[in-house]
Image: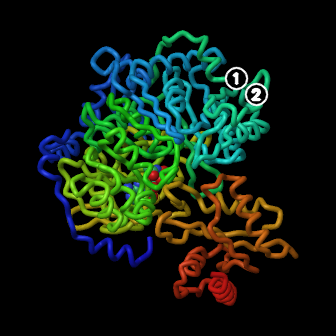
Amino acid sequence: MAEKTLEALLKEDRHFPPPQDFRERAVVRDPKVYEQAAQDRLKFWESFAQQLHWFKKWERVLEWNPPLAQWFVGGRTNLSFNCLDRHLTGSRRNKTAILWEGEPGEERTLTYAQLHREVCRFANGLKELGVCRGDRVTLYMPMVPELAIAMLACARIGAPHSVIFGGFSAEALRDRINDSKSKVLVTADGGWRRGAVVPLKRNADEALEGSPSIEKAIVFQRIGTDASPIMKPGRDLWWHELVARQPDWCDPEPLDSEEMLYLLYTSGTTGKPKGIIHTTGGYMVGCFATTQWVFDLKEEDLFWCTADIGWVTGHSYVVYGPLLNGATTLMYEGAPDFPAKDRFWTIVKKYGVNVFYTAPTAIRAFMKWGEEWPKKHNLSSLRLLGSVGEPINPEAWIWYRQTIGGGRCPIVDTWWQTETGHILISPLPGITDLKPGSATRPFPGIEADVVDDKGNSADAGYLVIRSPWPGMLRGIYGDPERYKTQYWARFPGVYFTGDGCKRDADGYFWLLGRVDDVLKVSGHRLSTMEIESALVDHQSVAESAVIGKPHEIKENAIVAFVTLKGNVKATPELMDELKAHVVKKIGSIARPDEILFTAELPKTRSGKIMRRLLRDIAEGKALGDTTTLADTSVVQALKEKYEESE
Ligand code: 7RM
């Protein structure tokens, strides 16, 4: 984050206590929950586990051999059973579980009983194809109920799912399938995005040419005649044909608490994405607890988390968290500005959304589009707003509160990561006084801290988590060493988040963005190294360095400095070709906003690229300390060139 905004942030002293009527009706009203949880963290988490169904009760709540944690040791449970069957005996049986709106405007509702039936059928379909407990299944789907159905079916039979965001390219899909060695791929003939078809099956076909582990591909028909995919005999089969012949009951596997529930690939500081491992029992308890307490969920609430299920936010707060709580979760397939910039507000009004959870990048886009769009709609059903994915600047926070929340809705700014599984820092909306731009305090039972370079508690420095929590990652798939070095080596026995953080006099946390080479671009997590590898993969590129440049809506714009091979000429056509190459290697979310061709990159005497200087150049700042630079003329020339190109 730029220094100017940081300074402004720390001067932020407005605060907003919970409105009285909200406080009186809140799920959590007693501030003592913090002390009670701190006194006995295990008892705190256990109290949530006790509200869920277990085939066999756990023997111990936690087994902690840093950095390896096991939660609810010896317990047996099933996520799908807890999300579905548990609600079938009482009044929730015919309650809407998933309320779906397709981008072209279709509506579908699935009650808990209907969802249960669909999940059972699909689970039986997977079994027919030979999927067994422990086999990985890759899901590459649009935002349709069938994605949630496939996840819950996998969870039911104990086959870990690996959801790949539909915006990833064929190559990115192939790499992730191969890393997980999935046996089955579930995809669709396409998805709708801004009126166009996203060619998921075509990408999948390309990916599967190099994915030997895949035996079968199940294709959900979302588009129909406009897509008409080519079905490969012996490999591809239609979802509707597979489920049509299945019975609508499937026994839930009594899974060990520590059996793998899913893998989710996320970008780290190297070029290769990591398959984050989440297991069954702890993740379930963490999602259940945080959804209920942070979002103040009531029986009659309609909850809308706008995240794509391809990201962790969609896993925990579109699917598992709300369904564990027996809530109604809204799922929307398309973009916020299609067919017009008020699509979200049309949906809020049409269904009467009560709790709305989105990302700062979206809020900043809404601000830019102007308040006339939300003002066209009655948004009075909203009672609580959430934010996630990056720091929210106070201006956006205030706008969100006033323009969307009508000044009456508390805002929960929730900090967490793919690795943490669920929210770790957030207000409790019935208790916490809010400060715009601060995620406020660690959730009860979470021991977060801010430390300096030496690992001592400090007012500013790195955000760390000092003790294990139920939903924490259990490892990186296929790379146990990287799990240790990445998260637990910087400060031994302490979880390193990779985020900078400041703590104020009231103990409030102010997240300041990443301190490593991970970038958030429109809420999507990318690694600079991944984009560099994609560029260097092009035949004309010798070397590249990618940085994030502060952007008013996207948080970061992607800027790539590129040196070309031998006598390759730098042309505008080549620039477009390189951008397209990155899209092909990773997906459109990684397309560089700017490419600058340069004869040389600034390096230290030991040959390391000095990204700090590149960032200064891109931000148009005076150049900082260049004394460690091997050749100072390189950077001066680069700066001049960049300024010319703008
Ligand atoms: C949920 C998610 C994780 C990174 C994390 C932070 C940033 C997320 C907030 C935030 C400030 C927030 N998972 N981040 N939430 N920064 N305030 N409320 O986003 O794995 O994709 O990204 O996102 O840098 O480390 S993620």
**Residue 623 position within the rendered picture, expressed as x and y whole percent measured from the top left:** 55, 86
Q: Position of residue 578 (x, y in %)?
A: 74, 64
Q: Amino acid at mark 1?
A: Leu
| The quadrant where residue 24 appears | top left
Q: How far apart, in angstroms, are the residues tagged by discs 2 and 1?
A: 7 Å
Q: Work out which residue is located at the far right of the displayed protein and give it.
A: 567
* Residue name at image x 33 percent, y 54 percent: 413
**In this rendering, does residue 500 appear at all?**
no
Contact between labelled residues 1 and 2, with CB atoms less than 8 Å apart: yes
Describe the element under mark 2 as helix, strand or loop: loop
When asked about the image quadrant of residue 320, the answer is top left
Give, as a three-letter code, the residue at label 2: Met
Q: Say which of 199 and 164 sits in front.
A: 199
Instruction: Judge by depth and name the residue closer to the eye, 207 or 631.
Output: 207
Image quarter (top left, top right, bottom left or bottom right) of the C terminus: bottom right
Q: Quadrant of ligand 1?
A: bottom left
Q: Position of residue 513 (x, y in %)?
A: 44, 64
User: Which of the numbered marks, if any, corresponds to residue 231?
Assistant: 2
Q: Name the residue furthest front.
A: 376
Residue placed under numbered mark 1 in the picture: 237
